[in-house]
Amino acid sequence: VFYSSQIFFTGAYHALKAKTLDMMVLVAVAIGTGWLYSVAATFWINGDVFYEASAFLASFVLLGHWFEMRARGGANDAIRALLDLAPPMAVLVLSDGQEVELPTAEVVVGDLLLIRPGAKVPVDAVVDEGESSVDESMVTGESLPVSKHSGDTLIGATINKQGTLRARATAIGSDSALAQIVKLVQEAQNSKAP
């Protein structure tokens, strides 16, 4: 009982040391009390024993703890999948009209990007010239591609469907819509109800 419940007793110790009461304290008190009373009932006093209740409680709460960790692992996989949506490379149009491929991480706000048909939009941007339809389903859930013209905004990691676009980068790195989504998922995963 105590070996399998070590996580609860360690957590309870740290919570009491920090002068807080949490679920770890509650579970440790329940398991410890049931086991100590059962030992006393076995050797010194007359009464029922609750060894199996302590073992069942430890097993039941450990199973719940395992489910929670598994769900968090799934959320971490979802965050990784979101981060993998952004393309690793972007095509930059230089002032003399030449096209240069560079890592998406090196794009700066104001750079003019070339987005060919079938390519992912590397960063959040505004269309400078060109017309196309863009698949924004990964962000909006909209199943139909959205028509884009000069002056329209593009969200990073969405897919350009048909026409070639030239777009100016407006948000990069942690300021991008994709990074904000990842941040919200991480905050939701790590937050606890008051």
Image: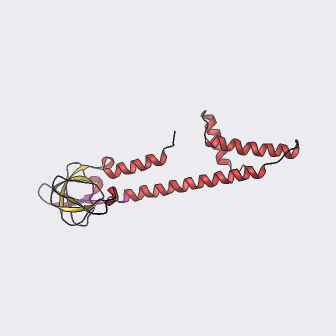
The picture places residue 68, in percent across and down from the top left corner, at: 56, 53
Residue 43 is left or right of residue 111, and the answer is right
Q: Residue at left 81%, top 46%? A: 38
Q: Residue at left 31%, top 63%? A: 143
Residue 186 is left or right of residue 161, and the answer is right
The picture places residue 11, in percent across and down from the top left corner, at: 62, 43
Decide which of 40, 113 is in the foreground and name it.
40
Q: Is residue 100 magenta?
A: yes
Q: How is the image coloured?
A: secondary structure
Residue 106 is left or right of residue 43, and the answer is left
Is residue 49 shown above or below 98?
Answer: above
Decide which of 135, 16 is in the foreground and name it.
135
Q: Quadrant of residue 144?
A: bottom left
Q: Quadrant of residue 59?
A: bottom right
Q: Quadrant of residue 103?
A: bottom left
Single out the residue that lies furthest toward the left: 96
In magenta, the rendered stretch is: 84-103
Q: Is residue 56 magenta?
A: no
The picture places residue 115, in percent across and down from the top left corner, at: 21, 61
Is residue 110 shown above or below 89?
Answer: above
Decide which of 192, 84 is in the foreground and name it.
192
Q: Residue at left 66%, top 41%? A: 26
Q: How many numbered circles does the render carry?
A: 0
The picture places residue 58, in percent across and down from the top left corner, at: 69, 51
Residue 76 is left or right of residue 20, and the answer is left
